[in-house]
Image (cartoon, rainbow, N blue to C red):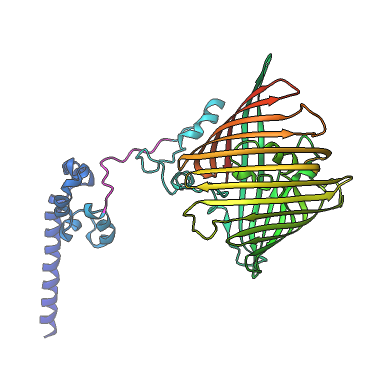
Amino acid sequence: MNRIIGIILFTLLLLSSCNNVFAIENSNKNIQTEEEIILDVPEHKFLSPDNLEQDTKDYTTEKEIREYTNNPEDVDLDAIDDELPENNNEIQSYTPPKRKIKDVESNIESEFNLFDNFDLDKDDDNKIDEDTLLGKLIARDIIRTDVPSYLLRDELTFHPKKGPVSKVQFFGAYNGYISNDWQPGDYDTGYDFGFIQVGAIGKIRGTNTDFKITLNPRKSAERNYMQNFVADAYLINSSIPHHKIVIGYSRNQIGKEGGSSSYILPFIMRSQISRNFGSTRALGVRLIGNYDLIDYNFAFNSSDRFFREWFAGPEFTGWVDLKPLGKTDGRYGRLIIGGGLNAGHNHTTYTVGSLYLGYKYKKFWSSFEFAAADGYNGSYVVDKKASGFYGTIGYKIHPRLQIIGRYDQFDPNRDVSGDTRREYTAGINWFIKGQALRLILNYIFCQNHDMEDSHRFLIGTQILL
């Protein structure tokens, strides 16, 4: 009995082996190499999306997939399915060969062969890839221009898991311009810097307190390096509703434009009263209030400027804005009527008073400001009686294109006649990416009583990262 069972098993095993050999011989007659299969596929199957249905019929059966490989048992069906025409929108007819890397033989090749592999176009479609930094910046759309915006805000913002800071955003800022100055018998061309700054803004963990640090890495020609190094260094707490308390070294609200950020100025240059009376920072404590119909800003500071002295004397700076249209939701525009006082002592007593009127409606805006001083403490302490006025109008002919004009008058000493200085400015702002990437064009006609008239033509660039 055992012999009979053994003979049956041996016979079945022999028949099975013969069938496998026969099947392999027949399959070898029909299987083509990968190169032969590719050559046999009509060209339109790779090039024309209109033939996706026919392509699907040619490649979707499991039997044909198994015939495509010499090892049917190791076929990755999921991987092949991903390559089917209906699952792959990017049908390519040709894969470019890899560039051969060769040794460089001269310093010229060593310098310029860097660009051989410098390719933002990873897909070979002549388009900058959106997942690159340059692609993200091009796609980033910034329209708002009344506040600073930063190109790399998302990339330079971090959320530490531990430590005293819960959120921090690093930034950099650059503003520079080509200046062409001419007057009878003289012509000068140069390049000047508005500002070069780096800094960080952030939140203190578990509190209603934020901070800002801004540094000027470029040395000033008028001050030593450390006197000009710190631009902002303050804490700001918003625990009280509608209020903020600022402690530290911050911009002083002397006049409306004089207290504005350099990043949102309409012109390359500030007005004359802002350049002389304001555009300063001071060390002290500040209270800021914000309501629908009124804003106010009161500060008690040291009268020192740029850390020349530890405490040169006390100073008070106050500003109030009335907003009569504050509850109309902007239907009639925005109207601001403001005024302020800056008074203190720094080797001499000084007082500056300012009045402001501003109106904005849709694409149109205007601002007018008058200031008078009995001594003032700007970049330097001056004991002269001075006054000035400017009026500015602007219109956005396109969300990214603005035309502006300004009349600006300044009398540096009211006790002396014939020294009034007037500036007439026309300009164009092209907001490529809001204030983050902006091109500026200004023409200024300077009319002076005590010197020859002159003309200035300025082309400026602003980048906020």
Q: Residue at x 64, y 58 (%)?
A: 295
In this view, the residue in front, 22 or 156, is 156
- Above or below residue 395? Residue 290 is below
Q: Residue furthest bottom?
A: 1
Residue 372 appears in the figure: yes
**Percent from the top left, x then y, of residue 438?**
54, 39
Displayed quadrant of residue 233: bottom right
Residue 441 placement: quadrant: top right
In this view of the protein, which residue sits in the foreground, 182 or 35?
A: 182
Residue at 65 percent across and 20 percent down: it is: 182
Q: How many marks?
A: 0
In the image, 144 versus 351, the foreground residue is: 351
Q: Residue furthest top?
A: 185
Residue 391 lies, in percent from the top left, at: 61, 38
| On-image quarter of the N terminus | bottom left
Measuring from the top left, give residue 367's x and y in whole percent. Answer: 60, 43
Give, as a single range, the part of the protein colored magenta: 88-100
Give the side of residue 101 with respect to residue 269, left or right: left
Residue 93 vs residue 232: left or right?
left
The front one of 357 and 36 is 357
- Does residue 255 appear in this view? no
Magenta segment includes 234: no
In percent of width and height, residue 197 lies at: 66, 44
Does the magenta stretch mainly form a helix, a strand or a loop? Answer: loop
